[in-house]
Amino acid sequence: MRLKDYDNDDGKRVWLSDDELKRFIEQAETPHQRLAFLLAGRVGLRRSEIIEVCPQDLVDGPTGDHIRVWESYAKRDKYREPPVPKEVVTIAETLAFQQDNDEPLLDVAGSTVYRWVRRAADALEDETGDEGWQYLDVHDLRRTWGTYLLEQGVIPSVVMAFGGWEDWDTFRKHYLGEFSPEAIRRERGKVDFLEGGDEDTEVVHPGTMPASTPHSAD
């Protein structure tokens, strides 16, 4: 988990590792909760978008499974189509079995999704002892998703299209300049002494340093 202060607000931004995101999703107590967690952490939807998804929004085309996310669901005049994992489709089809095609899959308020996220995060904080979970919000799941896509090699313009970002400067500031816990671990592995060092290197203990030889000052 990576934490970073907000510029002007209390709390912290959070980036989860992929393993942490999987553990978080497993905290879901119902299919509805699991779908909400997946839509945020694996599809990059905002909280207001999660509660508007209807069965008819899931589409299968030549590029695979996607979801149509409408900027204004009432007007339905502008949308994006981020890809979705097969599990999202499976859960959505199950939940939609006894409802109309244009009814939201999650008939809850955005505040309910927030409470689901906080309850799962609190459970993980109790389980792991990691205080970082207390800062997790719905938007941090979207943040984790966007950063993960970039580090997997998805080109920035495509990530922007998937996530609905239109302002390049804002996207560059909040995503291109950030990194995930996986990136930190990868870069840390490049530093010898952070990974235990070279086993063949002789260890010199304090008090046994060899006599110094004369040398000129730097």
Image: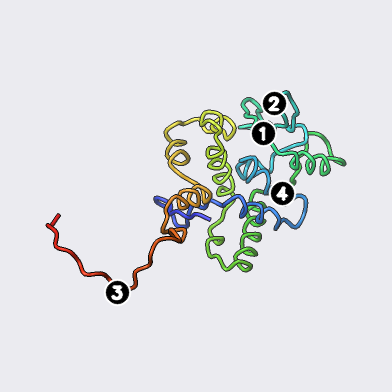
Q: Which amino acid does the dot numbered 3 rest on?
A: Thr
Q: Where is residue 86 in the image (x, y as percent from the top left)?
A: 75, 39
The answer to whether the residue labelled 2 contacts the one labelled 4, judged by CB atoms less than 8 Å apart, is no
Q: Is residue 142 above or below residue 124?
A: above
Q: Which amino acid does the dot numbered 4 rest on?
A: Val
Residue underneath mark 1: 83
Point out the frontmost of discs 4 and 1.
1
Point out the frontmost of discs 3 and 4.
3
The answer to whether the residue labelled 2 contacts the one labelled 1, judged by CB atoms less than 8 Å apart, is yes
- Give the crowd class for mark 4: few <14, some 14-19, many >=20 residues within 10 Å: few
Point out the frontmost of discs 2 and 3.
3
Which mark identifies residue 63? 2
76 sits to left or right of 91: left
Residue underneath mark 3: 208
Q: Which amino acid does the dot numbered 1 rest on?
A: Pro
Secondary structure of the residue carrying tag 4 is loop
Marks 3 and 1, the one that precedes in the sequence: 1
What residue appears at the point 29 percent right and 74 percent down from the top-left corner? 208
The CA distance from mark 4 to mark 1 is 23 Å
168 sits to left or right of 57: left
The answer to whether the residue labelled 4 contacts the one labelled 1, judged by CB atoms less than 8 Å apart, is no
Marks 4 and 1, the one that precedes in the sequence: 1
Residue underneath mark 4: 108
